[in-house]
Amino acid sequence: MSSHDRDLNRTERLFAEVLLLQNRPNMTSRDLAEHFGVSRRTIFRDLRALSESGVPLTYAEEGGYEILEGYQLPPLMLSAQEAATLLIGTEFTKLQPDPSLRQQADEVELKIRSVLPQEVRDYIDRLQERTVLDPYWLHAVPGPSDDDEGRWYELSRAAAQQFSVAMQYYVPSRDEVTQRTVDPLGLVYYTDRWNLIAYDHLRDDIRNFRLDRMESMHVTMNRFEPPEGFDLEEHLEARGANQAHEEVVIRFDKRAYERARRYIPAQVQEEREVDGRIEVTFYFENLDYVARWLLRYGIEAEVLAPDALKVAVRERAEKVAEQYS
């Protein structure tokens, strides 16, 4: 590690120590050492440096260090990665149904942008043009995953700066890992997963790659030009329009619907109360999945349409009954 890197790491730690003591006063030197993974001697040197730089540190009667109330840090400085993280967070908030939350998210975004250097703002603009948050795009089957190992930022940066990416990608239909080189065109979030939309050199086509199926990846030094006229949102809309979706209508008991509502695998188009029960309408292409999902609600859920889904639920229920006959 270079002396510059060591100085940077210490500066970051000193800044973090101030933030920590402002939010969690009365921390001892042992507490601080354990939190930052350094020795107590290092913590004592840090505290001395903070005091010499004008930070009003005191030792509380209850034991532990604290910073006198009223002390303020210099103006907030964010790295490009930190700014990207915060702004993506505001985009998630804008998806919420509460209009006050959406308004606050807009105001937070404006404040964050106001403190960013111009080059970081330009970078963030390019990144946001290549990022789409839509929990219901293509009505994909939901399933949370935390296996993408933090690749979002690397891929978003590659998309914004137009660098190709090499990766080992798992294909579940063939149960094999393939080597791919792709040109990242954007990232889309839906049903609790991040997906990379990219031009695949192997298939000579624009494909979708789930981040949690990337065994490994690295950004190359090879620059690329996006397909002429490519627009991420238009591409997603065109892909969605080509999917054959069935209209699904289900009637739930009220109590069952309270449990089922958050797990409906698509955006609800209509929700109404009929004879004391809740009738919902949505569109989905995988009726077999819906049939399996509905079995957990038993007689508390009734399929009204389509007929193919009624048949699928009945056949699965009969198989369950046979298993216990």
Image (cartoon, grey):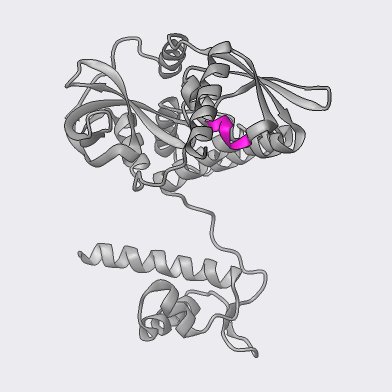
Q: Is residue 135 visible?
A: no
**Is residue 275 located in the magenta-colored stretch of the structure?**
no
Q: Main secondary structure of the magenta part?
A: helix
| Residue pictured at 17% horizontal, 34% vertical | 221
Q: Is residue 279 left or right of residue 178?
A: right
Locate residue 271, reporting x and y percent: 72, 22
Residue found at x 28% / y 67%: 6
Residue 290 appears in the picture as rendered: yes
Q: Quadrant of residue 72?
A: bottom right
Where is 83 relative to 8, above or below?
Answer: above
Of 263 and 8, which appears nearest the observer?
263
Query: Residue drawn 53% across and 39% down?
Result: 113
Residue placed most toward the observer, 74 or 47: 47
Q: Which residue lies at the image location 32% right of the left edge and 36% below the top edge?
A: 155
Q: Choose top left, top right, bottom left or bottom right for residue 34.
A: bottom left
| For residue 63, side relative to residue 169 (left or right) | right
User: On the rendered image, what quadrant is the N terminus found in?
Assistant: bottom left
224 lies left or right of 234: left
- Answer whether residue 294 is magenta in the image: yes
Residue ranking furthest to the front: 325
Is 205 drawn above or below residue 187 in the view shown?
above
Please tell me whether residue 239 is drawn above or below residue 65 in the rendered image.
Answer: above
Residue 253: give x, y in percent of width and height.
Answer: 74, 32
Taking 149 as reference, is 25 above or below it?
Answer: below
* 110 and 159: which is toward the camera: 159
Question: Bounds of the magenta span?
Answer: 293-297
Q: Position of residue 213 (x, y in %)?
A: 30, 38
